[in-house]
């Protein structure tokens, strides 16, 4: 998964490039991008406790994970807590404007250091009031004579690997001094994400949705348009063409672009008549995160971020869903417009997609011997992801 040299990287696509491809599919009667062949996998992909533990160990404890966007910690002293991958992690913007990550743990007795993410120059432990600066140094110990002989410099906050690039902040969910090379991790996906201008995306709202299904079953629902007309009859299916999507793989990452019903009007029309649309699409960052760009009501862009995590057992998961105001959104557009769009997405995902995931998970746990799940050629993104997941955890797709 090493990135190629910048000089040879794939150039970012423009929205017009993507629109041409989508309109061509519609002009051909509703075709879609296809994989070479269907792919069958065992239900153990979603039900095997050993695979679940391998994923937690090899994916969520070792790989770079998207923790937040840069404007979540916009100014010196801003902090952001990230607990989803296991250890409690604290991301802080230092006075030098550098983003750092630490275990959210006081080095006195291990108490949680920060609970409220507000701007501050010092982080003070609520247990005994030990205080730390934004660079993680221990700067205050009440009754310090009782700790005579303790090296204060050795009691700074425990660092966590972190990296910031393109408006995104990644961490690894363990202690360590490493600076993550985010650009190298993203490879050819990086230039595509830069087109979303995430460095200027301002946070508006976040929700958590718990699901009675394996995290991959839920993740699969984000990567294909095949289900829109059946599952989202009165919601997304009203505005999006079912089973017509673009797929582009970037190593373990991918982008899919679902086709708006409005593109039907572009068929046979001179491109000069097409309206200008902000760059968008659904960008999957391996192993668990999706950044979605779409036109916002009132103009400019809406940025959605959806991150999926294993729950307390193989058949449980949770998703953090957030919305950010795009850097190009007009000042006249109220934040409430982004809240309304986000709430709608959360409602559809939780009541439609994850409802199917819950019942499917239960069926897979009781599937007969020899039963296999099949991903069609029109589900190329899902095929790509499952192959890469299996490779990283060192377990073949079919355990039978």
Image (spheres, rainbow, N blue to C red):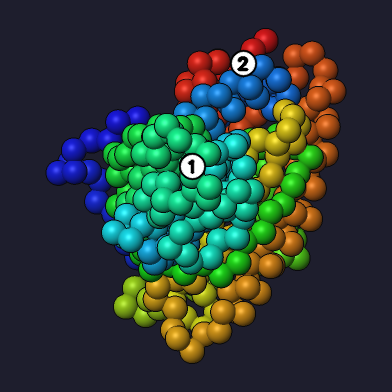
Whether residues under marks 2 and 1 lie with C-beta atoms below 8 angstroms apart, the answer is no
The residue carrying mark 1 is: 145
Q: Name which quarter of the figure residue 187 lies in.
A: top left
Instruction: Decide which of 73, 22 is in the foreground and name it.
Output: 73
Q: Tag 1, which secondary structure?
A: helix
Can you name the residue that lies furthest to the bottom here? 332
Q: Tag 2, which secondary structure?
A: loop
Q: Is residue 68 visible?
A: no
Q: Name which quarter of the figure residue 148 lies in.
A: top left
The residue carrying mark 2 is: 398
Location of the C terminus (image quadrant): top right
Residue 360, given in percent of the width and then of the height, sits at 79, 36
Q: Residue at x 14, y 44 (%)?
A: 7
Can you name the residue that lies furthest to the top here? 400
Q: Residue at x 39, y 47 (%)?
A: 137
Q: Is residue 213 visible?
A: yes
Residue 243, given in percent of the width and then of the height, sits at 59, 51
Q: Residue at x 59, y 28 (%)?
A: 56
Location of the N terminus (image quadrant): top left
Q: Residue at x 48, y 66 (%)?
A: 119
């Amino acid at each position: 998964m090493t990135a190629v040299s910048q000089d040879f990287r794939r150039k970012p696509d423009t929205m017009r490039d993507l629109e041409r491809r989508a309109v061509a599919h519609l002009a051909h009667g509703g075709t879609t991008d296809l994989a070479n062949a269907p792919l069958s996998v065992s239900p153990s992909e979603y039900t095997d406790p050993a695979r679940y533990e391998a994923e937690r160990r090899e994916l969520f404890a070792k790989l770079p994970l998207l923790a937040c966007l840069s404007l979540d910690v916009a100014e010196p002293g801003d902090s952001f807590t990230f607990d989803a991958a296991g250890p409690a992690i604290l991301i802080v913007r230092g006075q030098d404007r550098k983003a750092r990550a630490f275990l959210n743990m006081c080095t006195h007795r291990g108490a949680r250091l920060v609970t409220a993410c507000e701007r501050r120059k010092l982080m003070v432990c609520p247990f005994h009031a030990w205080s730390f600066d934004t660079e993680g140094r221990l700067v205050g110990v009440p009754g310090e004579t009782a700790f005579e002989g303790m090296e204060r410099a050795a009691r700074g906050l425990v660092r966590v690997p972190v990296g910031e690039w393109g408006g995104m902040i990644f961490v690894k969910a363990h202690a360590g001094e490493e600076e993550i090379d985010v650009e190298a991790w993203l490879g050819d996906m990086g230039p595509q994400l830069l087109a979303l201008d995430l460095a200027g995306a301002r946070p508006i709202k976040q929700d958590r949705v718990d699901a009675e299904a394996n995290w991959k079953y839920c993740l699969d629902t984000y990567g294909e348009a095949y289900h829109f007309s059946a599952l989202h009859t009165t919601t997304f299916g009203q505005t999006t063409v079912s089973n017509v999507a673009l797929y582009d793989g970037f190593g373990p990452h991918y982008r899919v672009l679902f086709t708006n019903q409005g593109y039907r009007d572009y068929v046979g029309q001179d491109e000069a008549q097409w309206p200008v649309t902000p760059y968008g699409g659904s960008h999957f960052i391996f192993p668990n995160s999706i950044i979605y760009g779409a036109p916002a009501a009132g103009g400019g862009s809406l940025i959605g971020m959806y991150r999926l995590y294993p729950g307390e057992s193989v058949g449980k998961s949770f998703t953090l869903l957030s919305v950010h105001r795009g850097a190009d959104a007009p000042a006249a557009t109220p934040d409430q417009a982004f809240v309304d769009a986000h709430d709608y997405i959360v409602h559809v995902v939780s009541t439609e997609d994850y409802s199917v995931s819950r019942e499917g998970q239960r069926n897979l746990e009781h599937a007969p011997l020899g039963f296999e799940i099949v991903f069609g050629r029109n589900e190329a993104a899902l095929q790509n992801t499952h192959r890469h997941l299996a490779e990283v955890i060192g377990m073949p797709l079919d355990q039978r």
